[in-house]
Amino acid sequence: MTLSQPYCICLRWTQNGEPAAADFTIGSGITALIGPSGAGKTTVARLLAGLQAPDVGTISCSDTLLYDTEKGINVPTAQRHIGYVTQDPSLFPTLSVEENILIASALDTAAYETLCAEADVTDLLPRNPQTLSGGEARRVAIVRALAAKPKLLILDEPMTGLDPKRRKSLLLLIRKLSIKTNTPTLLITHHIEEMLLAADHAVLMAKGQTLATGSIEDVIANPQTSAHLGIDDAGSIITATIISRSDGLLCADIGGQTIYLADDDEPIGSRLRLRILGRDISIAKGNIKNISIINQLPAIVQAIDSQGHEQILTLELCDTPHKLLARITEKSSIALRITEGIQVHALVKAVAVKELMTD
């Protein structure tokens, strides 16, 4: 399988009378473009697809320019090979599901049948789009876009109107298809949970400006993410690999330490993405015996951020590449004499560890 080519975006436009800008790269896997309403996310999607022109800037895919103001390059939408799925699936009501998918398909019969099977739409093919549920229509729209073998897939708020169960199911499908088809995907959302469930990388935008880019771990740890999305506790993201199971718990390696979490029948060897909220972490100066909390992770206090009568501790987990953010009261910090550089134990209940994704 060939590696997908990165898209480099450097664009400037005017939004509500104010200058706006997008500067980021879309590589392999799923990149979440996240931000509150009015951030400029849909505008970026339209600029990428060629449905709208910026004031100035460039869009390139590897060494190929799709848009360049100075060079006068503006590749037409149809020639950019970008699949664009909006909130409205926009299926043709006079065609069957299968005819909707085949109308722009570039797949041979075997690849087409495999894609339909992977997306679980085979049984839907004879039906009229007007008989589909909201989740079914979204799945068909995504399959139709992928059948055209796009170089980039843009999904603009595809989960709008779906209940939590269908939302999670669709996000997991998007991730599976992105990996199977090796299609770089830009997932636009204003829900942090959607980003955490599906994406590998993230871009945070607000008020028409790019505020943070990078891995999921980096963007979730950025204070601007919580501030602009109205989240009291974004928590921390760590990756883990399951190494064993016993007594209803999984034991997972986090790159030098082990962590226990609830067993949801994931296979041994699976790679997990875990989210731990700051409020679910307690701090101790040493290992505590005769306590129900199994996860007692040695860590170094790297930084202390005071917020009112609370303190946010940045903890560097010993012998691992991971960091945790812990929220404790100022009173507790004083009582424990918490200072930067000291070693502590981060106490986390196994049931408080939230599993987001399994690969």
Image: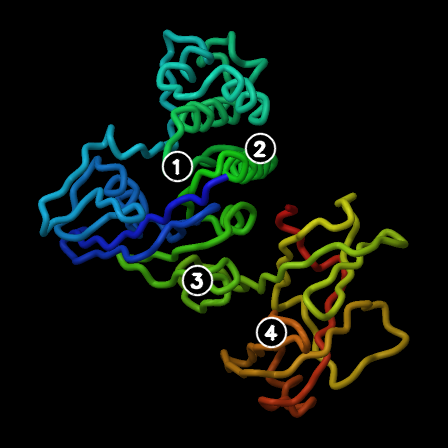
Judging from the image, what secondary structure is the residue with disc 2 in?
A: helix
Q: Amino acid at mark 4?
A: Arg
Q: CA distance from mark 3 to mark 1?
A: 24 Å
**Residue 225 has which mark?**
3
Depth-wise, is mark 2 or mark 4 nearer the camera? 2
The image shows residue 335 at horizontal and vertical percentages of 69, 90
**Residue 166 has which mark?**
2
| Residue at x 27%, y 55% (from the top left corner) | 22
* Crowd rating for badge 2 (residues with CA inside 10 Å; few <14, some 14–19, many 20+): some
Depth-wise, is mark 4 or mark 3 nearer the camera? 3
Which residue position is annotated with label 4? 327
Q: CA distance from mark 2 to mark 1?
A: 20 Å
Colouring rule applied to residues: rainbow
| Image marks 4 and 1: residues in contact by CB distance under 8 Å | no
Judging from the image, what secondary structure is the residue with disc 3 in?
A: helix
| Residue at x 46%, y 41% (from the top left corner) | 2
Q: Which comes sooner in the sequence, label 2 or label 3? A: 2
Judging from the image, what secondary structure is the residue with disc 4 in?
A: strand
Depth-wise, is mark 3 or mark 1 nearer the camera? 1
Where 157 falls versus 206 (above or below)?
Answer: above
* Crowd rating for badge 1 (residues with CA inside 10 Å; few <14, some 14–19, many 20+): many
**Residue 258 has which mark?**
none
Which residue position is annotated with label 1? 153
Left or right? Give the position of 129 relative to 208. Answer: right
Q: Which comes sooner in the sequence, label 2 or label 1? A: 1
Q: Which comes sooner in the sequence, label 4 or label 3? A: 3
Q: CA distance from mark 4 to mark 3?
A: 17 Å
Q: Which comes sooner in the sequence, label 3 or label 1? A: 1
| Residue at x 60%, y 74% (from the top left corner) | 327
Q: Amino acid at mark 2?
A: Arg
Q: Amino acid at mark 1?
A: Leu
Depth-wise, is mark 2 or mark 1 nearer the camera? 1
